[in-house]
Image: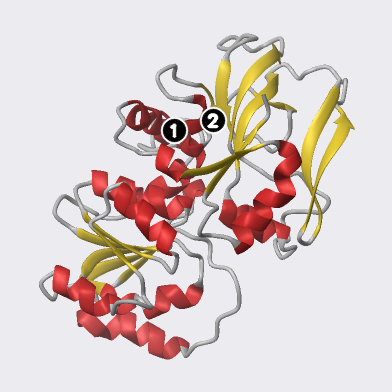
Amino acid sequence: MNNKQIVFTAPWQVETQETKLASAALGPKEALVKKKFTLISPGTELACLSGREGWFPMPGVPGYAAVSEIVEVGAEVREFKPGDVVFHYGDHSAYQVVPAEGVFLKAPEDVPLSWIPFVRLATVAFTSVRVSNIELGDAVVVTGLGLVGHMASQLAKLQGASLYGVDLSPRRLQLAEEVGIDAALHPEQVDVLEEVLKRTNGEGVSALIEATGVPKAAVDNLPLLAQYGELILLGSPRGEYRTDVTELLNYVHLNNQGSITIRGAHEWRYPVAPDPFVKHSLVRNSQIVFRLMAQRKLQVEPLISHVLRPEQAAEAYEGLRNDKERYAGVLFDWT
């Protein structure tokens, strides 16, 4: 069987390649799936495409958000059958053999198929809410309104918080307003600290969700936090940043009566499958996102900017890298 894959062949080099699908028998708990849609995760995939992510070898097939139809299942798979449509952590390929367990879930019928891959980025964002103390009536700032930042904003809003988003892209700020953010702030057009203090009666916010992954953004925005505030690192920090660490630590230790907490919010802090000793899991988070999408409480459609064929992969990554005003949520259509 012929397969089609999007391959990062070298830094900033993207190809769509035809390959032969391996004909080895399925493992007892595996499934062969045919993709319907896969979603680009811009932050992670552009970092991989840069060649600076040591865990991603080149040439390599990127991607980890897919909705697919099952073609065949292994001998021990009981909960799924050929023809079932599933959400899973699939790469950018037409066919793939994957484990039929863990985050391998039947797609709900009341959610559009093109929305299903966004569950992956919503569960990435979910961790920022899970690790925080965000409560009804709190104020929250999200720095970086890419797809994960947008999802974090919506989820924090569902917690009952007032939500202020910060980004350099006018289009991203416009999208944030469309999905119900309380204020969309461009740091080159307004004084963000002044605006946040004005909107919070001079107190600052209870949580700062840093979704850019730019270390300087986390440090520079610490003054937005109120007493007992939390800096939540959602975006994986990338790139070199030099600063006086003593000054930074003293700010956390001494300012606001030494009451700032820094929390990591990487999704893998929770188990994949439900565990009787842990409330949260990636499976549970995914199922909750399904319900929020079905109830139209989590908005996805405004975030979809392009639905492209796999042959347009180079165009997709170039757009996400250099044309952030037009490219946001980019899906590959494998049908």
Q: Position of residue 310 (x, y in %)?
A: 72, 37
Labels 1 & 2 near each other (Cβ < 8 A): yes
Q: Amino acid at mark 1?
A: Ser
Alpha carbon separation for disc pair 1 and 2:
8 Å
Say which element carries label 1.
helix
Q: Position of residue 9 (x, y in %)?
A: 83, 53
Q: Position of residue 244 (x, y in %)?
A: 47, 90
Q: Can I make out residue 58 in this image?
A: yes
Q: Position of residue 98 (x, y in %)?
A: 69, 27
Question: Residue at point 62% right, 63% down?
Answer: 322
Left or right of 335 in this view: 6: right
Tell which of 58 and 189 is nearer to you.
189
Say which element carries label 2.
loop
On the image, which quarter does residue 79 sit in?
Answer: top right
Question: Callout 2 environment at 10 Å: few (<14), some (14 to 19), or many (20+)?
Answer: many
**Image quadrant in which the N terminus is located:** top right
Left or right of 153 in this view: 36: right
Check the image and name the residue furthest to the left: 201
**Image quadrant in which the C terminus is located:** top right
Q: Which mark, residue 286?
A: 1
Question: Residue at point 67% right, 53% down?
Answer: 317
The image shows residue 246, relative to residue 7, as above or below, that is: below
Question: Residue at point 19% right, 48% down?
Answer: 160
Q: Which mark, residue 155?
A: none
* Residue at numbered disc 2: 103
